[in-house]
Image (tube, rainbow, N blue to C red):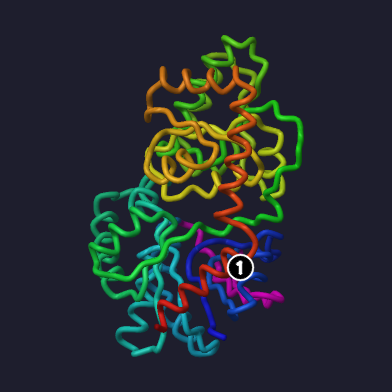
Amino acid sequence: MKNLMFYGTTDYGFDISKSDEEKFKELSANFSTFVMTYGKEQKQIQHPFVNITYLKKPKYLITQYLYFYLLNYKNLNRYVEDNKINIISAKDPISAFLPIILKTFNKKEIKIVIEHHGDFLDLLLNQRNFYLKRIIKIISMIISNFTYKKCDLLRGVEETATKELANKYNQKYIYFPAWVDHTIFTNNKMTRNNFLIVGNVIPRKGILFLIKQFHIFSSTNNNIYDLKIVGNTPNKDYLKKCQDFINENKIQNIHFIGSVDSENISDLMNSSLLLLMASSYEGLPRVLIESSLCGLPSLSSSIRGISSPFGDQGGTLLYKYNNSSDFHQKLNEFINNKTLQEELSKKCQKLGAELAGENMFLNNWIRVEQILYE
């Protein structure tokens, strides 16, 4: 049994969620699992299925990145030695920098996997407000080029983008979706009467576009539907633009819910008629797997990572990116056709089960191990 470590700044919390517990429980059938991440304080917690070490999160964003990604060498070295880590899965190419340094210069017998969830620099620079963006971009590109060349495997969530990256750096690769808890996300046969957006309120997600289009649709349908927006709000300037539009137009049926746990997201998906997306870029969106398992169809921009497999196989109507008229044509087609609604719901449930059924995540990580040690 190999010792597998996840390295990145995902805060699982000192009391991990039921969904995260299920993930680590599933992995425990073949791996001893460890995590090093940030928390509110420095702490180590031994859960039944995972050992999590929390480093105290610094106050300022730039300090957080510098400390975890560049100055955490001693902590990481000691942790790898003490726990006899065999495989390190880095959340992104920057997270992989210290593990790669550890392996390259300390000659550690470890395998490094870099996760690929989409355009990393776009996610990094556009999700939050950074000063000196140009300098940060240059430094990030230098580090990424180094880590991509030195890692042992790329693990992506979508085939085409992952294959392109692997070919660029002459690396082995594997692709499979991020973890989705099929025990939480399931069709509960609830009454569906809302529209739903799930995702960070940032420009790349096109939230303002969706708010404007829903307002037009709702106004012509006697405002009988509500739109609920679930997700973090890391870009305050963009959030203000969204709120200003709502306030200026005196809109009463659009609600920001904020960040909620998986159980509540599942309930919201089960009480919704349609999931809306307007992303300019995605890897393989986990939210579409979650909504699929709940039998919730979606209306999304026609972009890579969504067109296939969700548009081709599973319950997603596609419209031309940022095209208002095409958006409304597809939306009205959906609303006025009950048969279409039922067909899309069945198709997305089928695809969701194929992507995130029982033991799928474990089996995919076993494949990772086989590739690393073949």
**In which quadrant of the rendered image does the N terminus lie?**
bottom right
Q: In which quarter of the image is residue 217?
A: top right
Residue where numbered disc 1 is placed: 41
Q: Is mark 1 on a helix, strand or loop?
A: loop
In this image, 66 relative to 133: left or right? right
Above or below, 232 against 322 in this view is: below
Query: Which residue is nearer to you in this view: 161 or 203?
Result: 161
Where in the figure is residue 201, as x and y percent of width and height?
50, 38
Is 41 a magenta residue? yes
Above or below, 172 against 202 in this view is: below
Q: Which amino acid does label 1 sit on?
A: Glu
Q: Quadrant of residue 111?
A: bottom left
Where in the figure is residue 156, as x and y percent of width and height?
41, 60
Where in the figure is residue 214, as x and y percent of width and height?
54, 21
Identify the residue shown where x is 53% and y is 41%. Answer: 314
Boundaries of the magenta span: 40-60
**In which quadrant of the rendered image does the C terminus lie?**
bottom left
